[in-house]
Amino acid sequence: MKKSTRFVAAALLGAAMLLGQTAEACTNFLFTRGATKDGSTMITYAADSHTLYGELYYRKAAAYPAGTMIQVIDWDSGKPLMKIPQAAQTYSVVGNMNEYQLAISETTYGGREELHGEIEGGIDYGSLIYLTLQRARNAREAIQVLAGFMKDYPYHSSGESFSIADPNEVWILELIGKRPGTVKPELAKKLKYKYTDGAVWVARRVPDGYVSGHANQARITQFPQETGKFQKAKGKGLHKVISSAHLDYLFEPEVECVYSSEVITYARACGWYNGKDADFSFCDTYAPLTFSAMRGCDARVYAMFNRVASGMQKYEKYAMGDATAERLPLWIKPDHKVDVIEVMNLMRDHYEGTAMDMTKDLGAGPFQCPYRWRPMGFEVDGKSYIHERATSTQQTGFSFVAQCRGWLPAKVGGILWFGVDDTYSTVYCPMYCGITDIPLCFREGNGDMMTYSETAAFWLFNRVTNFAYSRYSDMIVDLQKVQSRLEKTFVSDVEKFDNRAKESTGEALERQLNDFCNRQAARMMKEWNDLDKYLLVKYLDGNVKKEKDGRFERTETGQSAMPNMPKYREEWYRMIVRDHGDVIREK
């Protein structure tokens, strides 16, 4: 994301695993109305980068005179790319959700090496998200805007998967930019191919009642394609599928798949595909599977699927990198409907309950810490190994659950449940999409990656979490008590506030929304500061102070009671003995 230096391609992630380079990555889960208890749609996002600072971006709505230009800035490097015409009217945007409850998130998959190189100018993936949020009111408008940008301008970044949600629908859109020199002249001549749009892409609506996900690997394989003459009138063969040549029909509710009219011909002109159109797979052509794409990327989607549906274990071999195993589907129907608390918790995962469980091996240390410091890959005696890449990871800048609720007025219906740092230990605080005053703890400019701020949530949560890593199996229990209490309270408070706020409009509503969100954030900061102090006192020097009736125990004279000194787990002692037993054994 913004100001980060990421190279998040599956191929690059694999290189990082094996060669020890730094790599960052993101995770998205998607939930349709029919898959949730309250009928909302939800998409999630973990923005993971070792250089990304967690803050909540805000852009206010504005009107612009004709001829106004806007400078496109690359969200990774901060470099200016190109100037494009500004929209006459833009919408307000809080984080990755706008005032109409349109939400967009992403993961980068990189794709074919031939398409990795950045080009001069163009629009990068981050600007594509935020410019679209300022110009579109629903998911289909977002697809139209994205397609328009790709028709008019080059695409600056590498392959990208986008999650797009509004109160009614959830879409997954996968896109990869074209690059000069990839088209073979002899094939182009034979195919009568003309190089036009800046990228090729496919967008699919997730069927209602289903859930999906992507995590730095392209997920769309074969997709429905147009057949025969397109008819608009109902009862005359209205297609459920359109190409970018027929975007006029995008807003027909029956349409459930849209794709770039060049998505197959470009691949043919480059010599990457020569089969039947009907057999064309976007993923297999533009982002062929690798070991790291399965083990470091799709495995995160598998972990989520495994927690919401039975029968998923048959995909575990695939998730662990077995290319001969049955491939993970693009979406599944869960066994039960989820609520927002469960979705928050689905973002908290270290592969618990699978063969990849990060709490079980030696790397977890004596206190079962499910984190591995980078680099991810290492070599021992000429053999290459990897640490797992889970949904919960230490380098998360921020994450969210975007919830769109169509039964409420737009500015009240959209909530960005926003958190900073590691998803496992963050607190998701409700930020209504209609706010105009970002709480200080999340505000842009309140500290940065190199500047500590006592009032910034990012630094407070990192301080607590990094301390918890030192005695994880014990401290995480205390942390989760406060986390769970806060999030359940927030959900309850939101329900009560909705009933009041839905009757308000204009400036009165704006004041109510701002006041509510700022109060929730202030409460979170206070309780987390209290937790910070509590953990330091309780776990000082590796000991664990005794407690009674909610207070630390003292002796009759007021001194600290002798603390507990818990042993390491038995298997850890055995590892110590195997490694150093001859030296430390009593004689």
Image (cartoon, rainbow, N blue to C red):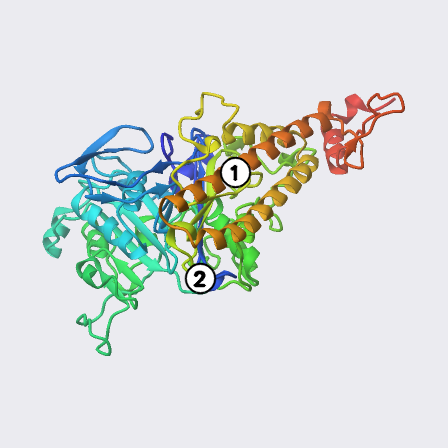
Outermost residue toward the bottom in this view: 235
Q: Residue at x 49, y 33 (%)?
A: 395
Rendered image: mark on residue 87: none
Residue 120 in sight? no
Point out the tag, 2 or 1, that comes first from the N-terminus. 2
Look at the numbered disc 2 and give the secondary structure of its residue: helix
Amino acid type of disc 2?
Answer: Arg
Relative horizontal placement of residue 149, taking residue 19 as reference (left or right): left
Coordinates of residue 473 in the picture (x, y in percent): 68, 37
Instruction: Look at the image and tell me in which quarter the C terminus lies.
Output: top right
Residue that carries the numbered disc 2 in the rendered image: 33
- Quadrant position of the N terminus in the picture: top left
Q: Secondary structure at mark 1?
A: helix
Task: Find the distance from the CA under tag 2 to the CA under tag 1.
Answer: 29 Å
Circle 1 sits on which residue?
519
> Is residue 122 at least partly visible in the picture?
yes
Question: Is the residue marked by circle 2 packed among few (<14), some (14-19), or many (20+) residues within 10 Å?
Answer: many
